Image (cartoon, rainbow, N blue to C red):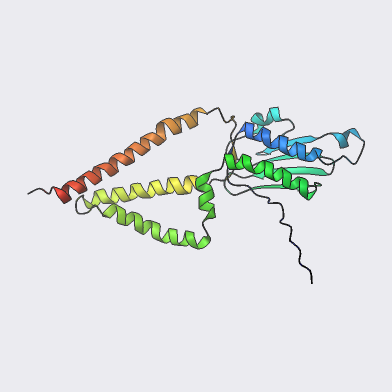
Amino acid sequence: MTTRSIKEPVPDKFPPAKLYLDDLEEIVTVLREAIETKKPTGTNPEDLQIDFAFKCTGRQCDTREEVPNVLKANREFSLEISRGWTDCKLTCHPWFYNMWRTSGLTEENAWTAYRRLKPIFERRKRRLSAFTRSIPFWGWIITGLLAPLLLHFVAHTFEPKISYRSAEWLEKLLVVTYIIVFIGSGFRHTTLSPQKSHERSFSRTLLVEKIIPTIGLTLLGVLGTLLTQFLMHKFWPKP
């Protein structure tokens, strides 16, 4: 009897990520160079030409320069680089998955392309989303059962130092925060922004510099007030 090592297949998925146009340019370069490793089989001009196809929301463009005209943020998109019977395709969905495949490449060249693509996604990885997707199914069952109980316990810990109604409002605030953070952000997958990484859209600037700090300060203010009332009632009770 003989033993032999089993070859690991080339992975077809990457971590959830928020990509930018300059990341797309890097991806195109990697896929194009992977296609060039395969010698064309024909001599016709069509067989020698490397084709570019980007699709988003039912629209398609054939050059990188046209991508911003076709791209819509937070929508599914696909990128395909091909020459003859050899092609590489990347498909990304904002909520569910990303996936890439090759056809006509050797396993060695496919592995080389994957190792060059992975750092791009790692650099833009959505860490919260990657964490939530790493939780096993039974973990979500436990979280779903315990989270409401935990939030209820935290909110009503301050009773009777604060009124029951205030505790109810605090519980609602904690639930909304939990939903926004873990449901709104934790389940995002792969998106492509219509800007380059050094640019920032007005909406994102407003969100990052105005809305999020305001919400954060409000939450800290509410929690700080409740904590102050609790400490004052506990250590300096009124006679």
Residue projecting furthest to the right = 43
Frontmost residue, 122 versus 211: 122
Give the residue at x 76% y 63%.
4
Frontmost residue, 124 versus 79: 124
Where in the figure is residue 223, as x and y percent of width and height? 29, 44
Q: Can residue 69 be seen in this view?
A: yes
* Residue 211 higher or lower than 168, as above or below: above
Give the residue at x 44% y 62%.
142
Residue projecting furthest to the bottom = 1
Where in the figure is residue 218, as x and y percent of width and height? 32, 38
* Residue 87 higher or lower than 3, as above or below: above
Frontmost residue, 162 versus 131: 131
Q: Is residue 58 left or right of residue 148?
A: right
Q: How many tags in the picture? A: 0
Q: Is residue 76 visible?
A: no
For residue 58, what is the image quadrant? Answer: top right
Q: Is residue 173 left or right of residue 19?
A: left
Q: In this view, does 213 lie to the left or right of 229?
A: right
* Residue 18 higher or lower than 160, as above or below: above
Q: In this view, does 191 lie to the left or right of 64?
A: left
Where in the figure is residue 22, as x and y percent of width and height? 63, 31
- Point out the image quarter for the N terminus: bottom right
Residue projecting furthest to the left = 239
Give the residue at x 78% y 43%.
87
Residue projecting furthest to the front = 2
Give the residue at x 84% y 44%.
85
Frontmost residue, 207 versus 35: 35
